Image (tube, helix red, strand yellow):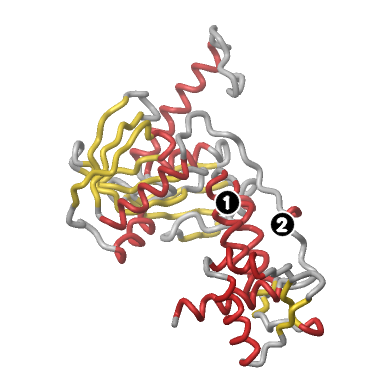
Amino acid sequence: MKGKFDRLLRILNLLDRERACKPSMLAGELRVTERSVFRYVSSLREAGFPVVFDREKGTYAFENAFKLKKARLNVDETLALAMARKMLGTFGESFARAFDSLERKVLEVCSPCDGLLPSSALVLPTFPAGETPDLSKLLKAMTKASMDRSLVWMTYRSLYSGEETKREVEPYYLFFSPDGFWNLRAYCRMRDGWRTFSLDRVRSWQVLDRYFVPRIFADEVGQEFSRGFGSYLDGDSVRVVVQFTPQIRPYVARRIWHASQENRELPDGGIEMTFTTTGMEALKHWLFRWIPHVRVIEPEELRQEMKGALEAQLVRLREGKPKGKRVKGSASPP
């Protein structure tokens, strides 16, 4: 019964879109015989749908411009659909095709709102990644492995050292980081600890026919992100206090950077922010972005690390430009 009901709905949707519905086309679309198509059309007529047959064209159609009533998408929903098209298109042809199919199914039962700018008016700048593997295949493989609780073997290249290591990991979930990369959160059996693997650094992988017992559950995932900073989720929680000058305040105060963030106005018009976070590496990268308009108040260890990094940079600036070939896509040193 469910199969027949689905086929009747499919015929109605095709007719509603004013497609040329020849019996042979419907038979191929529904994977049934033309005799079955005739029976389905008769059932629709008996149910009160004004389906007629145009003998000249040899097609079925709704009589007198009859239209099915569709759910209407509001402005936010239509805009979300357009934004999703732009964003998923940046992840390769596989995702673009999948979204095309999804969008067609949505628009079969829903109508977009009128008067909204088309998706061509939304621009999402993208740049090709240098060594990205087949992202769609990798994403699908890791998603299925995390759902099935299957162990994964991978060869992973470190971003900092360039060293390649072979890992056996327990995949838990994937997330998209603010810096524009997909990441796998997993328990690494080689390191005997939690790790975040950037998918663009995975050189090869294999989903194994072996399984694992989960160490964390879905309700604990949000807790990890509330403690971490950006895509850095590991380490001990540390209380951090930083101050920003009045000149840079409008830029740092325009958003919330961390779940634990607390702001305090300073007498000179600047702003003080307090975090409790585990993502110290990401926090340091973020702080360097605001130099010379930022000052670390605590912890002292972070103050000294920032000071040492700045002193090292001053030495490099005094030494001038390094000799050697310039890497394509890299910025010239100051």
Residue 119: assigned label: 2
Q: Residue at x 52, y 69 (%)?
A: 32
Q: Give the position of the N terminus as an image quadrant.
A: bottom left
Q: Could you tell me residue 20's position as x and y percent?
A: 73, 68
Q: Give the position of the C terminus as an image quadrant.
A: top right
Q: Quadrant of residue 67?
A: bottom right
Q: Nearer the viewer, mark 1 or mark 2?
A: 1
Q: From the viewer's perspective, is residue 317 above or below residue 293? A: above
Q: Residue at x 76, y 54 (%)?
A: 121
Q: Residue at x 42, y 47 (%)?
A: 139
Residue 254 visible in rendering: no
Q: From the viewer's perspective, is residue 161 above or below residue 323? A: below
Q: Nearer the viewer, residue 316 or 8?
A: 8
Is residue 222 shown left or right of residue 296? Answer: left
Query: Which residue is labeled 1 in the image?
Result: 97
Badge 1 element? helix
Is residue 20 shown left or right of residue 35? Answer: right
- At label 1, counting other C-alpha atoms closer than 10 Å, the crowd grade (few under 14, some 14-19, many 20 or more) is few
Q: Residue at x 18, y 48 (%)?
A: 210
Q: Could you tell me residue 243's position as x and y percent?
A: 50, 48
Circle count: 2
- At label 2, counting other C-alpha atoms closer than 10 Å, the crowd grade (few under 14, some 14-19, many 20 or more) is some
Q: Quadrant of residue 329?
A: top right
Q: Could you tell me residue 69's position as x and y percent?
A: 68, 84
